[in-house]
Amino acid sequence: HDHLRHIAKGETTTGLNHQNHILMIHKQAPGYALGMRPAAFIPLAVFAAVAAFMTAPAWLAATPSVVGELNGLDLVGSYWSHWWTADAIGRGVSPFAGTHSFYPSGQSPLLQYNLLDAAIHAPFGWAFGPRLGYNAACFAALVATGWAANRLARSAGISASVALLTGVLVEAS
């Protein structure tokens, strides 16, 4: 470990010692501990661009909007469940109990909504409020979906370019 002594003293290194010095600097770069090289960020940038394109109508609307099909029945329920879950967790109440849906007869949120994604995305609601938090959670879910499909394709031995296309197709589907 003679080269480490030179590096610690700030001395100039050459040859193999210089290569080790450069490697040590590279290992300290952000993302390296996660096993991510700079080229690994390219798919993330692509998936973020696709998510931005897909969610742009909600972000750029003249009136406050949320991501999703406005005429679809699921949008209102999903939006409500994200708000309810973040609010309940924030107050220390179980989001899985309650009779707020289908008032006055009541329906348990556990039976009616997918509260798992709402619980995972609750920090977005706390940070940005209900509407922007819901939109940010949808954006993050789209990016994560593309990334996961890409990583699955790469782990199956698919080339980087085809894995990127796989991620984009799954994300946009």
Image: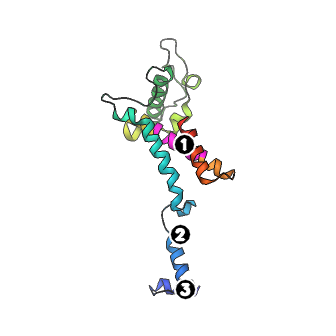
Counting residues from the start of the chain, the first of labels 3 and 1 encountered is 3
Relative to residue 25, is residue 151 drawn left or right?
Answer: right
Question: What's the residue at 48%, 83% (across, down)?
Answer: 8
Q: Which residues are magenta?
A: 138-149
Q: Is residue 45 depicted above or below 68 in this figure?
A: below
Q: What is the distance, in whole Å, between disc 3 and disc 1 at their CAs? A: 43 Å
Element class at badge 1: helix
Furthest residue in direction top, as rendered: 104
The image position of residue 40, as x and y in percent, is 54, 57
Q: Is residue 48 depicted above or below 133 in this figure?
A: below
State the residue in front, 129 or 58: 58
> Pointer 1: what residue?
168
Answer few, some or many: residues within 10 Å of disc 2's Cα (few below 14, many 20 plus, some between 14 and 19).
some
The question of residue 112 being in magenta is answered with no
Q: Which circle marks residue 15 in the picture?
A: 3
The image position of residue 53, as x and y in percent, is 43, 39
Disc 2 residue type (three-letter): Lys
Element class at badge 2: helix
- Of the residues tagged 2 and 3, which is closer to the observer? 3
Q: How is the image coloured?
A: rainbow
Element class at badge 3: helix
Q: Split into 4 quadrants, where in the image is the N terminus? A: bottom right
Disc 1 residue type (three-letter): Val
> Can residue 163 be seen in the rendering of this structure?
yes
> Pointer 2: what residue?
27
Q: Is residue 71 depicted above or below 155 in this figure?
A: above
Q: Is residue 164 depicted above or below 79 in this figure?
A: below
Q: What is the distance, in whole Å, between disc 2 and disc 3 at their CAs? A: 19 Å
Question: What's the residue at 43%, 34% (across, down)?
Answer: 134
